[in-house]
Amino acid sequence: MRLLHFNALNRLILTDFRGKSIPPYAILSHRWGDSEALFEDVSNGTYKGKEEGSKKLRFCAEQAARDGLQYFWIDTCCIDRWDNKERSKAINSMFQWYRNAARCYVFLSDVSVASATAASQRSNWEISFRGSDWFTRGWTLQELIAPVSVEFFSLEGQHVGDKASLSQLLHDRTGIPLAALQNTPLDQFSTSERQRWAENRRTTEEEDIVYCLLGLLGVSMPTTYGEGQESARRRLQIEIEATGSAPSIIPFSRNESFVGRESQLAELETKLFSNNQTTTMLAVVGPSGTGKSQLALEAAHRTRLNNKDCSVFWMDASDMNSLYRSYASVTQKLGVFGADDDQADPKQVVKRWVAAISVRQCLLVYDNVRSSTLRANDSSAREATDLTDFLPRSKLCSVIFTTTESNTAKALVSQDVIVLRELTPDTALRMLQNCLTTPLPNAEQQEAMHLLRELSYLPLAVVQAAACINASNMTVQQYRAQLAEHKEAALEYSDDPSKGELRESGLRTTVAATLSLSMSQVRHSNAVAVDYLFLAACVDQKDISLELLEAASPQARKDAIKALDRYALIIRRPAESALDVHRLVHSALRKRLQTEGRLQEWIKRTTRQLLWLFPNDDHSKRSKWRRLLPHAQYVLSHTLRDHGKERLDLAWKCAVALHSDGKYKGAEELFVQVMQARKRVLGDEHPDTLSSMANLASTYRNQGRWKEAEELEVQVMQTSKRVLGDEHPRTLRSLGNLASTYTNQGRWKEAEELDVQVMQTSKRMLGDEHPDTLSSMANLASTYRDQGRWKEAEELEVQVMQTSKRVLGDEHPSTLISMANLASTYTNQGRWKEAEELEVQVMQTSKRVLGDEHPSTLTSMANLALTYLHQEQWKEAEELGVEVMQTTKRMLGDKHPDTLSSMANLASTYRDQGRWKEAEELDVQVMQARKRVLGDEHPSTLISMANLASTYWNQGRWKEAEELQVQVVQARKRVLGDEHPSTLTSMANLASTYRNQGRWKDAEELEVEVMETRKTKLGVDHPDTLTSMANLAFTWRSLGQSAEAIALMQQCVRQRSKVLRDRHSDLVSSLRALEQWEAEEAEAECYDPCRRSGTVAKKKQRPP
């Protein structure tokens, strides 16, 4: 839940409280106007331009302050309407949000009371109050009933009364019992009585008059716009009656017009729950429009009707986002742990769902499974059978898949595939009769049979024909006559079957004919509606935002949508302010435009509209660009690359969005197109050309292709200096980018020189708090950190984090990066608790803001896993480590630097748990890959060599460990310098190997140097310093220098007691060693009072 407040500088702040304790808040109830302040207006500060919305914001804030409340909630401002998952969850949470509000303010925009004096005189406002439209709306019913405190205000903000003082007037106006208005628990009223409270109310969408009752009735069910009010009411009644039955989710009402498919339905019902060993899996496959979903829906409703103990869950598998939304709905219905936590890992929640579902009898329907549903973005294709990873393994469960793709069906189900073709003539006739609003006269029965044969008995065509007959008041004979006129053209408009799907010979021609006839009818009454179809043909067929559809007014758009809906040419999605077009309709529309030579004209028009709507690189609009990306990418993939400036600008916007979402391969492809076009049109040295080169270089850098990145960045830097000047912001940015690449290549001195130059110039030219200045400071801090200069890094990182929070906000990606950087520095300093606190915040926020599989989210998970590892929380470290490695491999590829780092981190976790064979396998893979990709002396290669040496060491393979460790020490001294923390670590590791080989003097020499240097560079309390003290103590003990060994170990134990938690193994081992040594010394002195030193048996020690 997000809440609003004005800060001390009078800035409107939107705070996300998901996963946090929610403070007391006020909530607004109001009727939407034409100038409401929306979520994006608040995010980008343009809300003041919305007169009506801005007025409500000020009113709500000021009234909340008078009531002692800092925070307030307004639906238009606090819900991101572009985020479908958020919108869906908000609808289901709304009743609870109003109930939990400390105050509810009802803003009556049609009730005018000019002064407090007038407000006290009921006669001045009671008539307009009674006549207020607020009392006629469906959703305001729960806004009146749910909150304990409801206060009413006029258009001028004058208080006219509250729910308590106006209870009799409210009762008279609404018919709601006084007891309900006085907050009597709702279960004291029957469900039928509560339903009657909405009888005289209305809603914009007819289904909402049912959905607005869900909170009042305590019922949870999916909202399925387009089903109609009666269908929604039937579903609601089923949910009410099913109280006490097994939980189920079927988002569609039973189709009362369902006919035919008796044999296939009987086959389905017979095979359900037939496997006595494991899950029964069935597939229904057939061309589009043959009624696969309707068959599965009938089976689902029959199962629920006949077996009250069987749960039935419907899963939309048309794409991954829809499938995860379905999983989320089911987990919430079942009360699975983490289902209501926005920050919970959805994959883990789904795994818990599989466990929960496997112990109950259930039927799962996966509707419209496609191979693309099972393909991760920006990764290689996965097999369709991967879906079965999230299926229960229980004889209590059955699964039905529906798909148009025979290959997908066979991959999911080895047998038990039910193939659907066209309907039988008798069944098609019954379907037509059921769909017609006027009964079919006997005289037209034969005419209808001829029509159905011409429609190929295709259910989709039958439904469209019936819709056209109903909307146009035609007879079947008239329809058939007109259809004949459109069929010849339809032969040209139909398209070839899609690859991988069942053959659809003739079906596309049939749909093209019915579509052509329907469009000609629609054009007579609403030409704009036909334009909407042509625009829909140029974008992806699903989730087409209504904002893409140009209209003279909102009402004109609504009228056009209604016209298309009447003719069954679209699928409405009012909850998302969007619509879908059936795949066969989409294909026929494109073919028609192509045949008429108008496709490119419409693509250009659609490109202009997308370009206008597609947001710039503003992280607060991430949900908006994610919904528009499929449409923009569709347009771009179906136009020529030299298709004008507008296409180029749209490609640029898409590339920037993909890059921001961590989809670097897709971004690279578009940036290459943009760069080549700009070079050709604008020239090599134009600023826009340089920007596109810089962005392309950034995609190379993020893919670990540093040589290619460097080449481009050097070009950009040199040209920018010459064309724009040394201190131009773009020049400074190019220097910073090149410095980042040097850092990734381990060329830290070169990076530092550039970073310092950029930071100093940015501060002077742009100011201390400019985002570019903050980036330059962060880059320099990272370079310091890589050089082991942690104090300098920390100072800069604290400044950057604090300023970023103040200037950009807590959830801005740059702020999250600054927090992660500071956490890394804390980790290097051994301040693990502080690191963990920051890393948990970063990971949770990144998951919510960027998504679970964004590279930045994966990095935050990897960092947290390492911090867990340092604190010996091995189970948590391993779980995160495995997840990061698997996801990184899939998203970025096996050889990406981040993938190799995740493998190395997981190997460290295995090594610390004594699982040395598993660690060695990963260590060898990582070392070989890094040598090949990065080179022998890259810092990351040296880390992998050191890790493998540690694994050899733990297995007692001293010679192999020593060979690697000597190489690492020599290379690090040469590359990093003698006093770099990594060099000291490698020297300490080599000393441990000498010690275990009995080469005490060699070990002592290295350990003294390491300890003294660490004391100077890291401080006495740093964990690495304390490790070197313990190691030297052991060596001295082995050399017979017992007094010195005990004194040093005592100091080590004292310091570790302050720094480490009580049960940390380093503290425990040093304490035990000290106790043993002191006991041995005491025992020896009993026999020889003159004894001053002694030796103990050699003991193998773990390297630092």
Image (cartoon, rainbow, N blue to C red):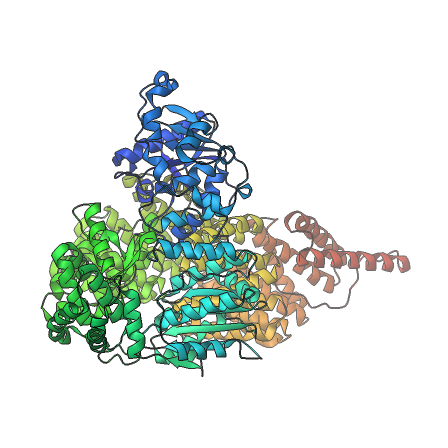
Q: Across the whole image, how many numbered discs are drawn on residues? A: 0
Quarter of the C terminus within the rendering: bottom right
Residue that sits furthest to the top in the current view? 117
Examine the image and state in which quarter residue 743 appears: bottom left
- Please state the horizontal and vertical placement of residue 289, each as a whole percent of the image: 29, 72
Q: Nearer the viewer, residue 710 or 847?
A: 847
Examine the image and state in which quarter residue 1064 appears: bottom right
Residue 6 visible here? no
Residue that sits furthest to the bottom in the current view? 415
Quarter of the N terminus within the rendering: top left
Residue at 26% in and 33% down: 51
Examine the image and state in which quarter residue 771 appears: top left
Q: Is residue 600 left or right of residue 263?
A: left
Q: Is residue 741 left or right of residue 847?
A: left
Residue at 71% in and 54% down: 1049
Residue that sits furthest to the front in the current view? 442
- Please state the horizontal and vertical placement of residue 402, each as a whole percent of the image: 39, 73
Residue that sits furthest to the left in the current view? 597
- Please state the horizontal and vertical placement of residue 656, each as a whole percent of the image: 28, 56
Q: Is residue 374 left or right of residue 1075?
A: left
